[in-house]
Amino acid sequence: MDFYKLVKSLDDLVFEILSWLYFYPRTLLRTLFRPFALMRDTEAQMEEDDEPAFGDRIGPPLFLALTLGLIHVVEMGMGIEAAEDFHNEAIRELMSDDRNLLALRIILFGGLPLLAAARQLKAQDRTLSKSMLKAPFYAQCYAAAGYAVLFNAAYFSGHAFMDTHQEMAAGLLFGGLLVAAVWIGWVEARWFHRVLGVGRWKAFRHALVLLVQWFALFVLLTLPF
């Protein structure tokens, strides 16, 4: 690679990273308040082009990864040692590395869009292949990122008052987790209702089964830790 190409690559990298400062907040607000329009547009773009530009937002898997990364930054800023929650000493030492902890969280929260995409394809009687899975998976990454934000916001709120006002901390934690659960349940139920063209009750059952499956996967992956 010659010097000009190297400089050009650095230009592109710097621009891409700095553009996140503008597009990340916009993408997050759209995820939280207009998830269906964002998800439908994403799936439509993916079906037209395997590599869409996503010019007005951050790409879904990258957005999910950035969200989990920012959550970890907030966690460190609050002095929360997440690695201490692991019971196994070897795993605790392994997860003391921020990169390993972030990788685990990406796998855990990434399981939600993967299971949702698989359920959608199965309900549509479509072939379950990597190429077919990609579009619904990308769309569902926004829902997973939104849930991660609400879930961790509840956890951080409870933690902030745990030492001084335990009853308030418990109330904030429980209330925040309830809001997060209702939000993801509502998003998934409405998504299945629109995409599959089924009744609201059947869509709710799809969402409920999905969340139970994901919770079981979450517990299964974290149980050894």
Image (tube, helix red, strand yellow):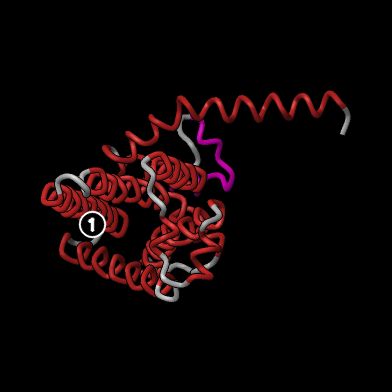
Q: Is residue 10 left or right of residue 97?
A: right
Nearest the eye: 121 or 98 = 98
Q: Residues within 10 Å of mark 1 (few under 14, many from 20)?
A: some
Residue appearing at x 73%, y 30% in the figure: 9
Kindly identify the amino acid type of the residue bearing the numbered disc 1. Answer: Gly
Q: Quadrant location of residue 199?
A: bottom left
Q: Position of residue 56 (x, y in %)?
A: 46, 29
Q: How many marks?
A: 1
Nearest the eye: 204 or 33 = 33
Nearest the eye: 139 or 16 = 16
Residue range in magenta is: 42-55
Q: Is residue 126 left or right of residue 33?
A: right
What residue is pinned by disc 1?
Answer: 185
Q: Position of residue 118 (x, y in %)?
A: 42, 66
- From where the camera sits, is residue 44 visible? no
Compared to residue 183, the image places residue 59 above or below, namely: above
Q: Is residue 4 left or right of residue 225?
A: right
Identity of the residue furthest to the front in this view: 164
Q: Position of residue 183 (x, y in %)?
A: 22, 50
Quadrant (top left/top right/bottom left/bottom right) for the C terminus = bottom left
At mark 1, the secondary structure is helix
- From where the camera sits, is residue 52 visible? yes
Q: Position of residue 181 (x, y in %)?
A: 22, 56
Nearest the eye: 123 or 67 = 67
Compared to residue 131, the image places residue 213 above or below, namely: below
